[in-house]
Amino acid sequence: DADVTQTPRNRITKTGKRIMLECSQTKGHDRMYWYRQDPGLGLRLIYYSFDVKDINKGEISDGYSVSRQAQAKFSLSLESAIPNQTALYFCATSDFSGGQNTGELFFGEGSRLTVL
Amino acid sequence: KQEVTQIPAALSVPEGENLVLNCSFTDSAIYNLQWFRQDPGKGLTSLLLIQSSQREQTSGRLNASLDKSSGRSTLYIAASQPGDSATYLCAGSGAGSYQLTFGKGTKLSVIP
């Protein structure tokens, strides 16, 4: 089984619908992240969380919200999906290596979202 | 704002060739650098991590180095194989930053 599991792997939805992408991990890491990947733009950070009580906005948080339900679970929500949120979404985790760095990141397999 | 450039954007080589992929950061104060591999439609697999006190890391046929004075990193792949065909991404974070900034990747094709 994968250490970082994302569900669903593929989702097609319509404009205005609420969508939740879920991520669970068995690595025991404290830190979790949500990224989106778009062709030509690379990966961009949406939100990150250092523990259950700590949520931080990333580079492109507008239109998204997150919930850290437990150390192992981090979900991403699109309250009212729009077509330009069509992308490949990745969850990632990292351990706490101390100091001012991110530690090594481990990624899930991705969730492909299409908003019509 | 940190920006990451990866050169070349695409590379095609015959099997067995040694090759170098390049990554450069606009802000050379890189604290942490990581190289990833991404297969089509798949997630990112961590290849090598260079932490703040390090300049180089090796794993099998892969070697990554980081020149902190110039903000440049190279990924060296020895004796390339068709199974190495993938997109390779570098990502770095600066001191005091918990966010990795990613390059757009180099798409590598190794021809049998």
Image (tube, rainbow, N blue to C red):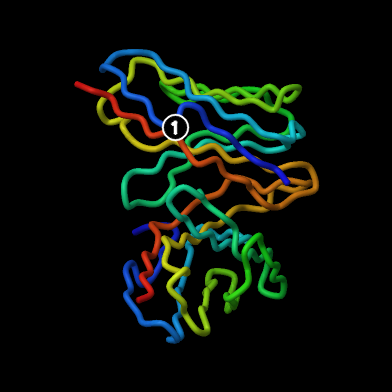
- In the visual, does A30 lie left or right of B17? right
- In the visual, does A12 lie left or right of B28? left
- Work out whether residue A116 or residue A95 is closer to the camera in this orientation and state it: A116
Q: Callout 1, which amino acid?
A: Ala
Residue B67 placement: quadrant: top right
Q: Residue furthest left?
A: B112
Q: How many marks are shown on the rendered structure?
A: 1
Return the residue at label 1: B9
Image: A51 above or below B106 = below
User: What chain does badge 1 belong to?
Assistant: B
Residue B74 placement: quadrant: top right
Q: Quadrant of the C terminus of chain A?
A: bottom left
Residue sitting at x 42%, y 67%? A86
Under circle 1, the secondary element is loop
Residue sitting at x 40%, y 60%? A110
- Work out whether residue A90 or residue A106 is closer to the camera in this orientation and state it: A90
Residue sitting at x 38%, y 34%? B107
Residue B50 in percent (x, y) is at 63, 32
Q: Quadrant of the N terminus of chain A?
A: bottom left
Badge 1 local density, few (<14 within 10 Å), some, or many (20+)?
some
Image: B65 above or below B88 = above
- Work out whether residue A48 or residue A38 is closer to the camera in this orientation and state it: A38
Image: B109 above or below A87 = above
- In the visual, does B112 lie left or right of B29? left
Residue B26 in percent (x, y) is at 70, 34
Residue sitting at x 38%, y 57%? A109
- In the visual, does B54 lie left or right of A80? right
Image: A116 above or below A101 = below
Residue B111 in percent (x, y) is at 23, 23
